[in-house]
């Protein structure tokens, strides 16, 4: 081969390489315009809280450093103020802001830092622990940049998405990835799974929570909420609340300050291939009913344990995790139909969906709502039957900062068993005792803390 031919061949290779480089670059998404347009409405949330609202341990020294025999002699009276941070975003020019519930939970003060570094103290409009969403409001002397919520069901698995937030306090960090899955069921601390999470491999880290998730059109498609991690940082498993849930929850919080969800009243499990065959199904599908609560909508409709729910209100249930999503999104009071397999035959039922927050237990009594302040600065709930060290009483769920209870030394986790010599069996006993307290007075309160019994004086001034 002549030198001329060799040079000619290298020229061809060089030209092809030169053409391929920009083609490769064009094949990858460019996020710059999306980031420029959508960064200004993203905010940093800074929460200030007292130790007693985050943990029972309020000691100024390390409790673990103190010999165990002496720990019960020390009742903490003072505590440090601590700070934490997360992300959020503005949804209206007059200052409404969306973030995660777990970021602002029990916060004594919520500060919002804008893109221009201006800071405002935020007012809490409403929270929803079930969906992990919260709505805040700030008063600014100008119209604020804001985001529009995207259209529901517009997101596809494999689609590019980007997140903007403040991981580890690093403001306005951008991360990109793809949608790994949709409709993930992740039970929360109350073992509820009413949110069909978006799973992504976007690098979400502590501080990103509450921040927005965008598609390539710049539309807000979700709110970053959770990660799976072993190290405390991202391992490529992050979860976002889909926009359709955000739209519904925030709309209710803005209008009513609370959220109403549907409740059917069944316990369910997944249908395996073996179970499907034994129940006469051609494939594994639906939700197998393991329990029906007394006087629930399911009970009133005639459902029973062993039924397999295939359709709820016209929506097919491919897997059991979809049923709570469908039920929770149904407005209480709505009349719905169910298609069920029983004794290898299909049957239809109709019922009226109840309100999740007004649901009843198997005994027909209303379940506890440990979110109501009792008048002395305590939020309490009935203790579980298996709580060691106490066969009766109420457990302190929250202590309101600078309240009567806070100044009297109560902390989260205390079990109250007597007030003024009156035994406290349940929440109703506690409520009656609190109502009888006169002002001013000092009431002896018997509690169990760390499996040890002691008395506190509830000083009402």
Image (cartoon, grey):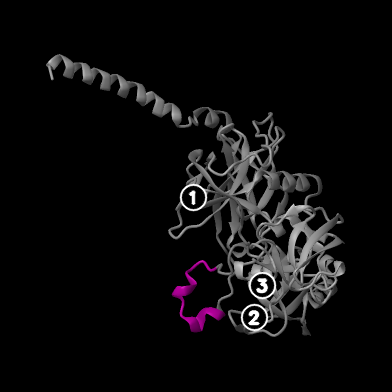
Residue 66 in magenta? yes
Considering the image in quadrants, where does the N terminus appear? Answer: top left
Q: Mark 2 = which residue?
A: 387
- Image spot of residue 205 (x, y percent): 49, 50
Residue 201 in magenta? no
- Image spot of residue 443 (x, y percent): 75, 77
Q: Residues within 10 Å of mark 1 (few under 14, many from 20)?
A: many
Question: Which residue is the extreme one toward the left?
Answer: 2
Q: Residue at x 49, y 29 (%)?
A: 32
Q: Residue at x 84, y 56 (%)?
A: 336
Residue 275 visible here: yes
State the extent of the magenta-drawn residues as a range: 59-72
Question: Which residue is the extreme one toward the top?
Answer: 4
Nearer mark to the viewer, of 1 and 3: 3
Describe residue 18's horizontal placement relative to residue 239 as left or right.
Answer: left
- Give the camera-side residue of 443 and 33: 33
User: Dot 1: what SS?
Assistant: loop
Q: Looking at the image, tell me whether mark 1 or mark 3 is earlier in sequence order.
A: 1
Describe residue 74's horizontal placement relative to residue 391 as left or right.
Answer: left
Relative vertical location of residue 201 with respect to residue 437 in this rendering, above or below:
above
Residue 205's disc is: 1
Relative vertical location of residue 48 with respect to residue 383 in this rendering, above or below:
above
User: Dot 2: what SS?
Assistant: loop
């Amino acid at each position: 081969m002549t030198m001329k031919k060799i040079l000619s061949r290298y020229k061809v290779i060089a030209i092809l390489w030169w053409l391929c480089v920009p083609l490769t670059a064009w094949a990858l998404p460019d996020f710059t315009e999306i980031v420029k347009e959508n960064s200004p409405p993203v905010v940093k949330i800074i929460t200030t809280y007292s130790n007693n609202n985050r943990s029972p341990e309020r000691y100024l020294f390390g409790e673990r450093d103190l010999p165990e025999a002496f720990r019960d002699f020390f009742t903490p009276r003072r505590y440090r103020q601590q700070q934490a941070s997360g992300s959020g975003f503005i949804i209206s020019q007059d200052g409404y802001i969306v973030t995660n519930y777990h970021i602002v939970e029990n916060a004594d003060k919520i500060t919002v830092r804008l893109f221009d570094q201006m800071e405002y103290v935020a007012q809490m409009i409403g929270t929803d622990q079930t969906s992990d969403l919260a709505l805040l409001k700030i008063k600014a002397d100008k119209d604020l940049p804001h985001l529009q919520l995207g259209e529901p069901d517009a997101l596809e698995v494999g689609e590019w998405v980007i997140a903007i937030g403040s991981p580890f306090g690093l403001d306005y960090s951008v991360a990109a990835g793809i949608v790994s899955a949709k409709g993930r069921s992740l039970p929360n601390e109350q073992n509820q799974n009413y949110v069909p999470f978006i799973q992504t491999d976007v690098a979400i880290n502590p501080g990103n929570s509450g921040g927005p998730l965008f598609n390539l059109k710049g539309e807000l498609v979700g709110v970053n909420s959770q990660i799976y991690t072993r190290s405390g940082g991202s391992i490529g498993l992050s979860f976002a609340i889909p926009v359709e849930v955000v739209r519904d929850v925030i709309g209710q919080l803005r209008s009513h300050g609370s959220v109403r969800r549907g409740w059917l009243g069944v316990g369910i499990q997944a249908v395996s291939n073996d179970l499907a065959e034994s129940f006469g199904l051609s494939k594994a599908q639906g939700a197998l009913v393991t329990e029906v609560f007394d006087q629930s909508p399911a009970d009133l409709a005639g459902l029973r344990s062993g039924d397999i729910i295939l359709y709820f209100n016209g929506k097919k249930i491919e897997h059991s995790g979809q049923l709570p999503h469908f039920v929770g999104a149904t407005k209480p009071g709505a009349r719905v139909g169910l298609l069920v397999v029983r004794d290898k035959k299909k049957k239809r039922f109709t019922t009226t969906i109840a309100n999740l927050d007004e649901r009843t237990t198997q005994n027909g009594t209303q379940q506890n709502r440990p979110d109501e302040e009792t008048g002395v600065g305590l939020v309490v709930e009935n203790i579980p039957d298996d709580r060691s060290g106490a066969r009766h009483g109420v457990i302190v769920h929250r202590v309101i900062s600078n309240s009567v209870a806070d100044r009297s030394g109560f902390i989260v986790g205390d079990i109250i068993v007597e007030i003024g010599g009156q035994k406290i069996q349940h929440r109703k006993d506690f409520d009656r005792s609190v109502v009888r307290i006169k002002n001013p007075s000092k009431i002896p309160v018997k509690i169990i803390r760390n499996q040890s019994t002691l008395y506190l004086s509830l000083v009402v001034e």
